Image (cartoon, rainbow, N blue to C red):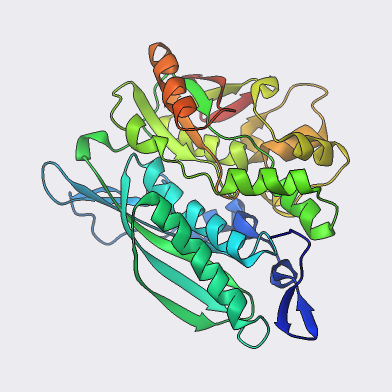
């Protein structure tokens, strides 16, 4: 479907899905500073020893051990439209939701659908297409959508609960990186920039194709990477941008990240859009939440900072591995179609912070 094709609620009422979105995709996440305040006094009354991963390090999913060889991964993710095409919206939302399972090193087992739709404002056919898009991604992942829940809402909302499986010894946390680790990113940045251009009606057909291709590429290498002992930490880059999610790794692991901006893969049109002065509304909110933990070089441009904080919907895996494992990690990524995967920098001893060069 074309990215400019109107979506009809009735035969005489053209509606674009993104018109309902105050912030599309992962750009509608609560800002990190506000989220931190909301959760600062939130303490679990009890933490069973079987809960291997909970809320303590802002990791991608919960992990609960059920026996010596199996642990369950549980996660949920949903958002408002990032594109106007309903089938693409469903695909993007489902891919994004399953990403957290892969980011923990797991393999998805099944999903539950989360559906909120403004009935009467968008057509039933459009809703069916959203659901079909999600189902197509789950089919590609080899899992069923086994149930779900739906409500009537003001904005279209779609996503999944993802349930996966991992060996307890192969869980990849965001807090287990080590000094000396190399940082690798599997997908290029810039999805937020492209979505902002789409909403303004200035995104090219190639830019739209690039955005959909990136956001519907399942992060399947996570399952293979979990089996490598020298891969120490994995997370996925979503609404808080590369800088925000890398800082979560730094805080959890007690390390400093050093990143070479020139080595960060970016979608070409996203760079052009950023250089024109465009940014998503989430970029400044992200920066206000964690900018004090980031050291930028003299002369670092605003457009570069906006790419660092650009909210990624269904972004790539951010991997911390021993230097001697880089070739094997890159081979796994390239073999599974992640042609733009790149080494960004490294982690060193020091306070939890990000240094950009």
Q: Position of residue 296 (x, y in %)?
A: 71, 26
**Camera-nearest residue between 199 and 259:** 199
> Which quadrant would residue 274 be assigned to in this image?
top right
Question: Do we see residue 81 in this rendering?
Answer: yes
> Which quadrant would residue 228 be assigned to in this image?
top left
Give the residue furthest to the top.
Answer: 324
State the residue at coordinates (60%, 52%): 33
Q: Position of residue 342 (x, y in %)?
A: 57, 23
Question: Do we see residue 180 in this rendering?
Answer: no
Task: Report the side of 110 relative to 234 (left or right).
Answer: left
Q: Position of residue 96 (x, y in %)?
A: 50, 52
**Camera-nearest residue between 293 and 63:** 63
**Camera-nearest residue between 23 and 243:** 23
Rendered position, 176 above or below 132: above
Give the residue furthest to the right.
Answer: 276
Image quadrant occupied by the C terminus: top right
Rendered position, 352 above or below 11: above
Rendered position, 42 above or below 174: below
Rendered position, 220 above or below 227: below
Q: Position of residue 309 (x, y in %)?
A: 67, 41
Image quadrant occupied by the N terminus: bottom right
Task: Report the side of 48 relative to 157 (left or right).
Answer: left
Task: Report the side of 14 relative to 323 (left or right).
Answer: right
State the residue at coordinates (11%, 42%): 68
Q: How many marks?
A: 0
**Camera-nearest residue between 284 and 23:** 23
């Amino acid at each position: 479907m074309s990215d400019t094709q109107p979506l009809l609620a009735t035969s005489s009422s053209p509606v674009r899905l993104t018109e309902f979105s105050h912030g599309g995709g992962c750009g509608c996440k609560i800002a990190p500073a506000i989220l931190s305040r909301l959760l600062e006094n939130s303490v679990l009354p009890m933490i069973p020893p079987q809960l291997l991963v909970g809320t303590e390090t802002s990791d991608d999913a919960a992990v609960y051990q059920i026996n010596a060889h199996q642990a369950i991964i549980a996660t949920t993710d949903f958002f408002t439209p990032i594109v106007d095409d309903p089938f693409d919206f469903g695909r993007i939302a489902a891919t994004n939701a399953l990403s957290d399972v892969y980011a923990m090193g797991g393999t998805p087992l099944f999903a539950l659908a989360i559906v909120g739709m403004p009935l009467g404002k968008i057509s039933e056919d459009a809703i069916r297409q959203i659901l079909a898009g999600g189902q197509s991604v789950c089919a590609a992942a080899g899992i069923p959508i086994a149930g779900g829940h739906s409500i009537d809402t003001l904005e279209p909302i779609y996503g999944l609960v993802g349930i996966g499986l991992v060996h307890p010894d192969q869980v990849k946390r965001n807090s287990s990186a080590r000094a000396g680790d190399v940082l690798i990113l599997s997908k290029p940045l810039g999805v937020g920039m492209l979505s902002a251009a789409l909403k303004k009606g200035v995104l090219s057909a190639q830019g739209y194709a690039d955005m959909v291709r990136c956001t519907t590429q399942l992060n399947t290498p996570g399952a293979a990477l979990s089996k490598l002992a020298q891969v120490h930490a994995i997370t996925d880059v979503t609404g808080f941008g590369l800088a925000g999610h890398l800082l979560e790794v730094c805080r959890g692991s007690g390390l400093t990240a050093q990143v070479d901006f020139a080595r960060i893969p970016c979608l070409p049109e996203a760079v052009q859009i950023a250089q024109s002065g465009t940014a998503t509304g989430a970029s400044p909110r992200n920066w206000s939440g964690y900018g004090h933990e980031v050291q930028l070089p003299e002369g670092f441009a605003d457009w570069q900072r906006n790419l660092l904080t650009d909210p990624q919907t269904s972004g790539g895996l951010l991997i911390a591995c021993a230097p001697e494992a880089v070739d094997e990690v890159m081979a796994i990524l390239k073999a599974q179609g992640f042609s733009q995967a790149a080494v960004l920098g490294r982690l060193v001893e020091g306070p939890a912070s990000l240094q950009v060069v």
